[in-house]
Amino acid sequence: NVTYRKLVFLNKELYATSSKFDKLKISKAIVRAVREKGGHFLEMKDKLYFDIGDKRAWDKTSQALREGQTEIRKRLEQEEARWKESKSSLQSDGSSKVAQYKQIISDHRF
């Protein structure tokens, strides 16, 4: 649960800047990472726990990633505007954070 929440938190900005197709890839990658570490996505039914399967796990992960997206997008837009105005918030390669996220998602295979 802690690993899952941390992965969701660390990917929220990337998710906010991604296309619909790439958003699903991010959700799938998080679910796969949790499962590879021995984690499960469970639901209790009749006092027993059952795995909810990948489809529902992807849906739940996408929902978790969407939480707070309005604020994240607004903050990223403000950072992008400040970067364009001053060029002082350059990342190590000279690009903005949004540009770097777009490069990450286009380069990475999930």
Image (tube, rainbow, N blue to C red):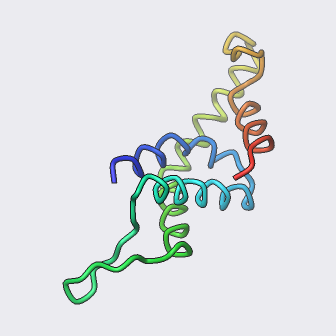
Q: Nearer the viewer, residue 70 or 40?
A: 40
Q: Residue at x 73, y 31 (%)?
A: 100
Report the front residue among 89 and 43.
43
Q: Residue furthest left?
A: 47
Q: Name the quarter where the N terminus is drawn.
A: bottom left
Q: Quadrant of residue 75?
A: top right
Q: Position of residue 14 (x, y in %)?
A: 63, 43
Asked if residue 82 is positioned above or below residue 10 in the image, the reply reads above
x and y percent of residue 22 in the render? 72, 55
Give me the residue at 77% from left, 22% from top.
95
Q: How many marks?
A: 0
User: Could you tell me residue 34's position as x and y percent?
Assistant: 46, 55
Provide residue 12's location: percent of width, then percent of height.
Answer: 55, 45
**61 or 1, nearer to the observer:** 1
Splitting the image into 4 quarters, where does residue 101 fall? top right
Residue found at the far bottom of this picture: 46
Residue at point 63%, 34% (across, down): 76
Viewer-nearest residue: 89 or 44 = 44
75 sits to left or right of 5: right
Relative vertical location of residue 33 with respect to residue 77 in this rendering, above or below = below
Q: Is residue 6 above or below residue 1?
A: above
Q: Residue at point 69% right, 45% down? A: 17
Specify whether 29 is left or right of 95: left
